[in-house]
Image (cartoon, helix red, strand yellow):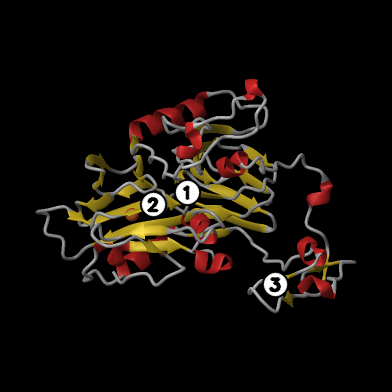
Amino acid sequence: MAAEAKAVDRRAGRHFVDASGEQERMPRFWKAFKVSREEIDGEIDRLKSIARPANGRRLSYIVHPQSTTNSITPGIRASIEVIMPGEVIDLPATNSSSVRICIEGRGEARIDNKAFEVGRLDTWSTPNMAVQTYANRGDVPHVRLMFSDAPLLEYLHALYVSDGTAAEAPAATEGEGEPAGHHRHPMADFVHRLPTGGGALKTYHAFIDPEVVEQTALLWRWEEVKAFLNDMDKDTPDLRAAIIAMYWNPSTGRTHGSTNTITAWMSGGVDPNWTGKKWDMARSHRHNVTALNYAVAGNWKTIVEREEILWGPGDLVLTAPAWAAHSNGRFDREAYTFAIQDNALLGALNSTIMQEYVNRPPLHLGARPGFEA
Ligand SMILES: [Fe+2]
């Protein structure tokens, strides 16, 4: 990558890098990689066996060999969390957001003012700055995979982790969610459109009191998702249109996130047309959105830049490193896979590039018309 090719020569005391004649180049994608069920189970067993840590958090990161920041993709951190029977953990509020999927046992979640119970394959989102408490009141360990956007905020040096001071506690509200004593200044919505150039001006009032979009934790119950997938029409020309469900958080709107950066998905279902004779593979394509898959049931295969990876229940795979050509498919009448992408992040950045057909130009999704499955 051009931007990394040259570094400031600090010994010379210069603050400049000569980039004359340099062309910006795309970074090389990370290698696809698989963490097997056996490896994950081994790590879960280790977390179960250790003495309870001081903060109560039995936690392990699943790290890509190319990562220097304990991440699994450049922008996403994957973790295994274990809560033993009788344990309760409190997590400090942080401005990162996350999605979790329960893979063993049951647990109770309290996220801000919302409380719910989760069981195997239930998935939930935690919005930025939420206070979280989890409890395992059962008699078997509760295990979850967690995916967070913290590496991105660390890269920007913008990660905030609360020290628990009371100032962040949600304020008492009066009327329509307006905290007591707060009255939004009318200038907060003031817009001055400039007569030429198409730009507009706002004032400091807008910056310090923007429109509020409140978010709460959301829960996607496995049984309900499974029923939806199995009701989907399986007679579609493109396999993906028959088997893919997005875990959508309505507050993210057209950027299609489960949180503002992370989009979770569940794909699969029962295929009544399955012949048992060949793999059902999707078309090979590429996008700058990165995708991870965690197989729930069935046999799956990914071909990433000609490398073939076979995966099955309990395996976690980097199936689509950003901009790597890839194709996913299944070999089973009934198969499911959970996926995590940074789709919402790229949507919010207006930066989603997808090349569905290798012989056609890439599409700038969301800014220009997309395509039909
Ligand atoms: Fe893809």
Q: CA distance from mark 3 to mark 2?
A: 43 Å
SS at badge 2: strand
Residue 264: quadrant of the picture = bottom left
Residue 294 circle label: none
SS at badge 3: strand
Tell me where residue 211 appears, x and y as whole percent: 72, 68
Q: Residue furthest right?
A: 181
Q: Which residue is mark 2?
A: 338
Q: Identity of the amino acid at label 1?
A: Ile
Mark found first going from the N terminus, 3 or 2: 3
Residue 101 circle label: 1
Compared to residue 87, the image places residue 186 above or below, namely below
Q: Identity of the amino acid at label 3?
A: Ala
Q: In this view of the protein, can residue 139 be seen by the observer?
A: yes
Residue contact at pointers 1 and 2, CB within 8 angstroms = yes
Badge 1 crowding class, 10 Å Cα cut-off, few under 14, some 14 to 19, many 20 or more, is many
Q: Is disc 1's CB within 8 Å of ligand 1?
A: no
Q: Which residue is mark 3?
A: 200
Instruction: Name the residue rendered at 52%, 59% in the picture.
Output: 258
Q: Tell me if 304 is positioned left or right of 353 in this view.
A: left
Q: Nearer the viewer, mark 3 or mark 1?
A: 3
Q: Nearer the viewer, mark 1 or mark 2?
A: 2
